[in-house]
Image (tube, grey):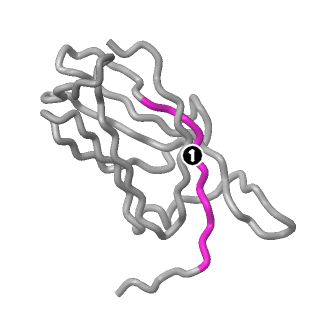
Amino acid sequence: MIIQPVIQDIDIYKDRDYSRTYFLKDSVGTAINITDWDFYSQIRPVYGSDTLVAEFTITTVPASGIVYLNMSHDVTITIDIPTPISISSIVTSSNMVWDLVTNDNTSSRYSLIEGKCTIHETVTRDVIP
């Protein structure tokens, strides 16, 4: 049973594809079978906010306990930077929050991972045909 989420900060670059793979294992390192589990992962400006910044596309390999989080460049380019971090007059990034939660096959809801999500501005854009 998962009691406390793992803290993991992530970095997402605007107009870039983002992907991350997670392997869910029990306390002895055996893959957890996640058949019939539902996963959700979102980015919000701050904890408790009703404003949804973006959602990850999630796919799984249930018998192996593998969870893939993805966000295409078509989505990352639309992320606004509402509270920018600047160097001189150049906006470079913004801190937000994210998490990965699940409803397992017993209908229990768990926070698996949470942390800060830094959105970074990029230079080169619109080069993919």
Q: Which residue ends up furthest to the right in the rendered image?
A: 88
Mark 1 secondary-structure assignment: strand
Q: Is residue 65 above or below residue 111?
A: below
Q: Is residue 100 above or below residue 32?
A: below
Position of 23 with respect to 10 (left or right) is left
Q: Closer to the camera, 59 or 26?
A: 26
Position of 6 with respect to 122 (left or right) is left
Q: Closer to the camera, 17 or 40?
A: 17
Q: Is residue 115 magenta?
A: yes
Q: Quadrant of residue 9?
A: top right
x and y, in percent, of residue 52 in the image: 49, 44
Position of 29 with respect to 48 (left or right) is left
Q: Which residues are magenta?
A: 113-123
Q: Which residue ends up furthest to the front in the rendered image?
A: 28
Q: Residue at x 59, y 40 (%)?
A: 116
x and y, in percent, of residue 5 in the image: 46, 23
Given the image, on which type of amino acid does mark 1 rest?
Answer: Cys
Residue of label 1: 117
Q: Residue at x 45, y 31 (%)?
A: 113
The number of numbered discs placed on residues in the rendered structure image is 1
Q: Is residue 38 magenta?
A: no
Q: Is residue 104 above or below residue 8?
A: above
Q: Quadrant of residue 85?
A: bottom right
Main secondary structure of the magenta stretch: strand
Q: Closer to the camera, 84 or 49?
A: 84
Quarter in which the N terminus is drawn: top left
Q: Residue at x 52, y 37 (%)?
A: 8
Q: Residue at x 37, y 63 (%)?
A: 72
Quarter in which the C terminus is drawn: bottom left
